[in-house]
Image (cartoon, grey):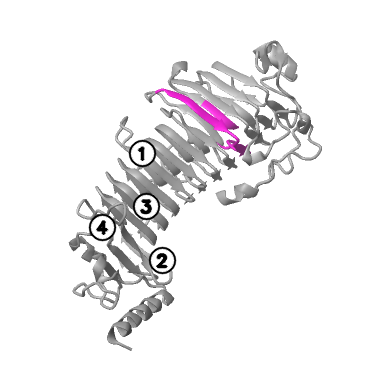
Amino acid sequence: MDMGKISILIRILAVQLLLIQGLPSIASPENNFRCFYFNVNGKDNNSGSFRHPFKSLEKLRNIALRPGDKIYLRGGQIFHGSIQLDSLSIGNKIHPIHIESYGKNKAIIDAKDSLGIKLYEGAYIIIENLRIQGSGRKSGNLRDGICIKKSHHISLKRLEISGFQKSGVFVFASHHIQINHIRSFENGSAGITVEGPYGKRESHDIKILNSRAENNPGDPSNLKNHSGNGIVVGNCKNVLIDHCTATNNGWDMPRKGNGPVGIWAYEADYIIIQHCLSYLNKTSVGGWDGGGFDLDGGVTHSLIQYCFSYKNQGAGYCIFQYSGAKPWHDNIFRFNISEDDGNATDSKSGLYIWNSSMDENQLMNCQVYGNIIFNSLGSAICFSETSKCKGIVFGYNVFVAKDSLIKGEYMGETQFWNNDWWSLEKGFHSNQVFNMKNWAKKTGKEIRGGILTGLNKNPEFLNPGKSHLNSANQLSSFKNYLLSPNSILRSKPVFKNYHGIRGIKL
């Protein structure tokens, strides 16, 4: 065998050995890409190769990364410090920069009182398979876990982030960002936050997928505004939140007043929240909100669909407009379920309408259809004392409540058509009216062309009020709110194809 063939064979065997060990292969000299290895047993005056790795993250500050470069941190090891990249380290569409673990388990970046990873004016960077931890929201850390500012085409994958006083992931004035399979927990302000300069929507084209925001209790330094959110996006546009879970957030917000929500948006345009689960979220004692899902002040052209909310202290679904926000309009809530939400805060309902601007032109044009609001402890819908609105249409929903189905008085133009109403204790009850026909005649609701459109029938769901889901991935097989074989709604054209969390065919 000639020496050329022997050389090729040796290279093939080397690559196979690396793959067996769970290690990335070393780039060939022809493609000009570089691999830098980090191992706590290495030395910073080494070459950074696999056999001679760097020791500390500080070494990265002296490297201007190029397209295609890869940074590998040894799995299972703890690296103290942080990673900070700026405009000197930029990949491209074909050859992004990678930062990830190698070997078994995730490498750990222990940022202590600092931030974990910061990207400023970065582009085409992939960060994956790492654990990033701070010293704790009440133990000295004052920063975000991952901070992405004025960057684009950034991908975060399979990361665990905890112990930061602000957000686990904070995105500001950035675009084309993908956040996938992130678990952000035990942080202060939020699990995941998207923000930007007020009114400019500089953060856009962002996807938050398959992620979990859990036990982010509140920011102890924030005494003027909400904190302890699961996932919150604001001053942005074109954001998709899909198959995400938010739970047990907000329980240690250090103030009374406006509070946190599991998954929500404000001052935003074209937001889609779908196939998500928000449950057991909380707020401070005496505080507001603590709900499941919310399209809040200034949101336009946005959609919440195929989501499930249960046992949140605040309402499951919130239609909110605060004074000073841009007009709220043209939004949709459809094919969602709320179970026993809102019974620890002021709404005492599954769905809550609130408009502190007191101007109906500031809260208008919303379709609410195909939803199930089930509340065995309180009401189905609450209209706040400040809830002026117009063009809000409720159609083809099923509203089930313990006693009175509606709390509060309608303060604006609202329409109800083809909904089913059922009071567990009274059969029908809305604001001291105990007969649906009398209520419809008195209020003009559920009447169209002089004909009563609404129903007053027990929907007979299969297993209502007994949900124990803990992941958005379980929603596709969720059957508690399918109609039982004996349900009278099966004989009604608009409900006969009811599929619970998967919606209805209209």
Looking at the rendered structure, the secondary structure element under dot 3 is strand
Whole-number angstrom distance, CA of label 2 to CA of label 1: 30 Å
- Disc 2 target residue: 106
Position of residue 364 in the picture relative to residue 7 (left or right):
right
Residue at the location (26% across, 65% down)?
Answer: 31
> Which comes sooner in the sequence, label 4 or label 3?
4
Whole-number angstrom distance, CA of label 4 to CA of label 2: 24 Å
- Disc 4 target residue: 67
Circles 4, 2 touching at the beta carbon (< 8 Å): no
> Which comes sooner in the sequence, label 3 or label 2?
2
For label 1, the crowd category at 10 Å Cα-Cα, with few meaning under 14, some 14 to 19 and many 20 or more, is many
> Which comes sooner in the sequence, label 1 or label 3?
3
Whole-number angstrom distance, CA of label 3 to CA of label 2: 17 Å
Whole-number angstrom distance, CA of label 4 to CA of label 1: 24 Å
Residue 345 lies within the magenta run = yes
**Kind of residue at disc 4:** Pro
Whole-number angstrom distance, CA of label 1 to CA of label 3: 14 Å
